[in-house]
Amino acid sequence: MHTQTHPVAKAGIRPDKHTFLVGENPFESMMARFDEAAHHLNLEVGLRKVLRNPEKQIIVSIPVLMDNGEVEVFTGYRVLYNTARGPGKGGIRFDMQVTQDEVKALAAWMTWKCAVVNLPFGGAKGGVVCDPSKMSMAELERLTRRYTSGIIDTLGPDSDVPAPDVNTNERMMAWIMDTYSMHKRHTVTAVVTGKPVAMGGSLGRREATGRGCMIATREALKLKGMPIEGTRVVVQGFGNVGSISAELMAEQGMKILAVSDKDGGIYDPKGLDIKGVLAHVKEHKYLKSYTKADRVTNAELLELECDVLVPAALENVITEENAGRIRAKIICEGANGPTSADADSILNDAGILVIPDILANAGGVTVSYFEWVQDRGGYFWDEETVNTRLEKIMVSSFQEVASMAQRNNVSMRIAAYMVSIDRVATVHRLRGMYA
């Protein structure tokens, strides 16, 4: 195992917001927003250096005995970006595209996301470079358990609490919890969230991110003085976040015009029958065989005329190339990093209200926090209590960010970063620097 604790970086501070470094690197894209927010906060140079660097980056080699008797070695990462406010919190993804820079950027996003909704967590993220679609369940279990043992020194309810992410699920979280518990010689349910309800998971967790998107969208419509009933919504991505967002928005009276998955989307200007679409996907898995609507590509879907656009699939789908053709009035970022830093100013100039990812999709980590609290207390809430408490946090957080945006004449994204960074920086000032 190689554990790398980064020293404070030299320079890297750009006080003039017009000179921020922006690139395709997800970490640099995220840091462009950080630097602009830090500029508006007049954040001390020393704290900027601290907050621009992850606390700890772990790289592990993961040997796995495959079903054919051969040994394969996979690479895994775990990054603890900042734990000043509490244990690291962040998912683990299994994907061939996982890189250290991506994991580092996502860990930083988790730091700001937890702070913007005022949870007592820091930010972390993990990933393993693999193709889970080509692995058996037994191979995935061996991979998950060996990865867990590789990073076990950082894990714990008080230090680092993982969760599911891309291509991981509650079953894998159960394996992580079991592996950790076997090493500790007693059951530790609070070491991970997103577990099955039967073993300490929380009711309402599966729907939480989509529910948070719906609540944030509803608050944005109120902010702009737009009616909820009949609001035209387009959703890119029909996985957990996109499908639940669409379903809950439809229940609020919004009209879902289009949805899509990796193979493209379906569109009906009169509004889709979302319950019918959900039933179709449950039976057929994909949207491509759905025949009761017109076909659109994912690129075309982003540019459809609508009131609300929900990019809930991949990173960097709205860029400087297509941002000028977006015809939504509100963008609710269900995915992490769906808008590149270069596209921000184009959307702002067009008067489009962007609910940034660290706020819009924070419903998931909020209910993960609820799960952690329930595990530690040994007392579990009903689903209505979970949803009521989630709504209270999402509404108050939205209002705090909107107020910050108005007071400082900045976008909702920069305001969300300002709220987050200010909270993390305040704790650093209070704790002081250990030397």
Image: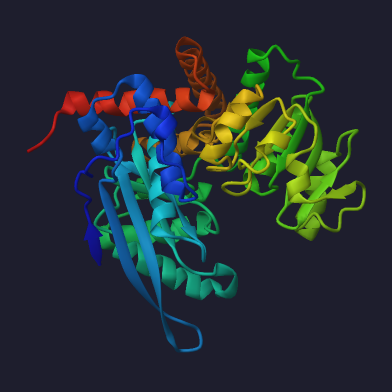
Specify whether 299 is left or right of 89: right
Left or right, residue 411 beside residue 100: right
Residue at image x 73%, y 41%?
302
For residue 236, side relative to residue 93 (left or right): right
Task: Give the image location of residue 168, x and y in percent.
Answer: 52, 58
Query: Which coloring applies here?
Result: rainbow
- For the question of whether residue 349 can be seen, the reply is yes
The residue at the far left in this view is: 435
Q: Which residue is depicted at the point 40% across and 54% down?
A: 101
Is 88 situated left or right of 312 in this image?
A: left
Where is residue 420, by image quadrant? top left
Residue placed at 53% from the left, 42% from the top?
337
Which image quarter holds the C terminus?
top left
Image location of residue 186, percent across then percent down = 29, 55
Q: Is residue 139 above or below residue 59?
A: below
The image position of residue 108, as x and y in percent, is 38, 42
Which image quadrant is residue 327 in?
top right
Relative vertical location of residue 326 with respect to residue 351 in this rendering, above or below: below
Q: Nearer the viewer, residue 194 or 317?
A: 317
Residue 385, percent from left and from top: 54, 26
Q: Where is the N terminus found, in terms of image quarters?
A: bottom left
Front-lying residue, 333 or 37: 37
